Image: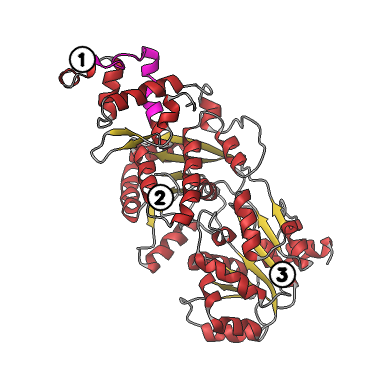
């Protein structure tokens, strides 16, 4: 199969005149029946890398996709291009007709959920049809090192091994080097089959702010950023609350989206968003996967995402048309405190990996250097030191060594008994002799009044940074206590 043949199909079936990025490299490997892992950023056209071969190869491409909503979005897009496609899920009413079409060779694409791989009759069904390709979407789900591990994905390799002549195409937007290596092993793909596209999305401006009044902060964002937007909220309740308050504050169409809504309402809200030029969707993280809406002008997080990988994937839903877009994260110390508490609920064998991911996210939040550079280095790239399009590059004066301020603050927390909140610690360090401080004898401590006026301005950002990295933790009654690497900072072994 020659490149001109591929270009002709690209034009006649999909309406494009040229491939983007690594699409052609991936498709050429698939057409040569070579198994491949393609790591491509959100919006880079991953679905084309299996949809185009599916109309050129004899047989059916079986697509494994983790979410029914995502599956149906991709199915509609494929059918709109004249591709013979169907899905086989618990939600489908016409399963028998789909099975007959599959057996009869009348499908180019068959979308299935990963849990179907564990069903013996599904293996029998595959044996009764001609297969052209296994396409595994969201392939990071197979790895315990990935940010969204799903055990059902581990059942895919035994299934595919039963059809060893059928090539495999694994696709993901978010996988660091460790996760990529694990995906190759878990899905039985040779190392030379790895293709990694660049992770940089230069049109996205990254900004991270401390969350003080999220409704006010997001209202300001919506005033400054006309056009469609997505706001990610941590819970279903927060999703509905924020949607209602933002609609009242801005007068714009703002709708909620989460798994607890009636499916018909959820589908209607999604359809309105896709068709709208100015609507904002407040959603839990499932929203956005596979949605073809290139003109999203901003993605905001009202709390911290699960990981850097999740952050990259979710913010990547902004600006897929190449025009300027904004990614804003609003965070609070309580976000990290809750996340660190949840680590104790995770299986022991996964806990270290989850802690590493949380620490990497904390580093992104607290850094005074270029956020894009830190993000790209996380995925193994070697970017310039400054991008010119993140909040730190545009607004921050650069790195400040706040180690001495951090040591004074940690020392004050320790010497006051690790039971007082930030307000009390700040007063002790500033030398404020109020009644509570004098009664407890804290005016006689060596840390009383030891910060200068200039250092006092750094106390609040430093305490946030220490909380983000786990050096300071909240007690049950709202006080501050030493945690993590606090003692190493006090000994001068680490900097802040």
Nearest to the observer: residue 163 or residue 310: 163
Q: CA distance from mark 1 to mark 2?
A: 40 Å
Q: Which residue position holds label 3? A: 167
In front: label 3 or label 2: 2
Circle 3 SS class? loop
Q: In the rendered view of the protein, which quadrant contains the N terminus?
A: bottom right
* Residue 23 appears left or right of 213: right
* Residue 162 appears left or right of 478: right
Residue drawn at x 66%, y 82% is 106
Nearest to the observer: residue 87 or residue 126: 126
In terms of sequence position, does the residue under pointer 3 or pointer 2 come before the other? 3
- Seen in the picture, residue 177 relative to 165 is either above or below; the reply is above
Q: CA distance from mark 3 to mark 2?
A: 38 Å
Q: Position of residue 113 (x, y in %)?
A: 53, 71
Please indicate, yes or no, whether residue 42 appears anywhere in the rendered image. Answer: no
Q: Which residue position holds label 1? A: 433
Figure disc tally: 3
Nearest to the observer: residue 8 or residue 486: 486
Please indicate, yes or no, whether residue 27 appears anywhere in the rendered image. Answer: yes
In terms of sequence position, does the residue under pointer 1 or pointer 2 come before the other? 2
What's the magenta region? 444-463
Mark 1: few, some, or many residues within 10 Å (few <14, many ≥20)?
some
In front: label 3 or label 1: 1
- Seen in the picture, residue 289 relative to 444 is either above or below; the reply is below
- Is 459 magenta? The answer is yes
């Amino acid at each position: 199969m020659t490149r001109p043949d591929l270009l002709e199909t690209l034009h006649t079936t999909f309406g494009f005149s040229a491939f983007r990025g690594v699409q052609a490299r991936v498709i050429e490997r698939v057409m040569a029946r070579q198994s491949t892992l393609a790591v491509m950023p959100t919006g880079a056209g991953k679905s084309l890398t299996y949809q185009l071969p599916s109309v050129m190869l004899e047989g059916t491409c079986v697509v494994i996709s983790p979410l029914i909503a995502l599956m149906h979005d991709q199915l509609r897009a494929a059918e709109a291009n004249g591709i013979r496609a169907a899905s086989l899920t618990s939600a489908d009413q016409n399963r028998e007709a789909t099975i007959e079409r599959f057996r009869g060779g009348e499908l180019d694409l068959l979308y299935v959920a990963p849990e179907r791989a564990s069903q013996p009759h599904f293996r029998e069904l595959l044996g009764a049809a001609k297969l052209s390709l296994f396409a595994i979407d969201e392939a990071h789900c197979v790895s315990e090192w990935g940010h969204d591990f799903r055990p059902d994905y581990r059942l895919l390799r035994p299934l595919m091994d039963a059809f060893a002549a059928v090539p495999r195409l694994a696709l993901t937007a978010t996988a660091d080097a460790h996760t990529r290596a694990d995906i190759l092993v878990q899905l039985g793909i040779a190392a030379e089959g790895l293709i990694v596209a660049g992770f940089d999305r230069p049109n996205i401006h990254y900004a991270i702010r401390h969350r003080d009044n999220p409704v006010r902060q997001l209202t300001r964002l919506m005033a400054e950023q006309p056009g469609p937007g997505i706001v990610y909220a941590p819970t279903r309740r927060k999703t509905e609350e924020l949607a209602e308050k933002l609609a009242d504050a801005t007068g714009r169409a703002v709708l909620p989206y989460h798994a607890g809504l009636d499916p018909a309402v959820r589908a209607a809200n999604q359809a309105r968003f896709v068709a709208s030029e100015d609507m904002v969707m407040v959603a839990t993280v499932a929203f956005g996967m596979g949605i073809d809406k290139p003109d999203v002008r901003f993605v905001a997080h009202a709390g911290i995402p699960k990981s850097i990988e999740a952050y990259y994937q979710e913010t990547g839903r902004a600006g897929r048309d190449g025009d300027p877009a904004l990614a804003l994260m609003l965070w609070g110390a309580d976000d990290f405190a809750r996340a660190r508490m949840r680590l104790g609920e995770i299986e022991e064998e996964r806990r270290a990996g989850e802690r590493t991911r949380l620490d990497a996210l904390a580093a992104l939040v607290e850094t005074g250097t270029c956020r894009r550079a830190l993000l790209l280095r996380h995925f193994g790239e070697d970017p310039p030191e400054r991008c010119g399009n993140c909040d730190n590059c545009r607004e921050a004066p650069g790195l400040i060594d706040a180690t001495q301020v951090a040591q004074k603050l940690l020392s004050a927390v320790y010497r006051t008994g690790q039971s007082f909140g930030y307000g009390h610690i700040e007063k002790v360090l500033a030398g404020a002799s109020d009644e509570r401080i004098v009664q407890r004898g804290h005016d006689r401590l060596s840390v009383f009044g030891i910060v200068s006026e200039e250092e006092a301005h750094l106390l609040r950002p430093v305490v946030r940074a220490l909380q983000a990295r786990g050096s300071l933790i909240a007690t049950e009654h709202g006080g501050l206590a030493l945690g993590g690497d606090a003692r190493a900072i006090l000994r001068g072994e680490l900097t802040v």
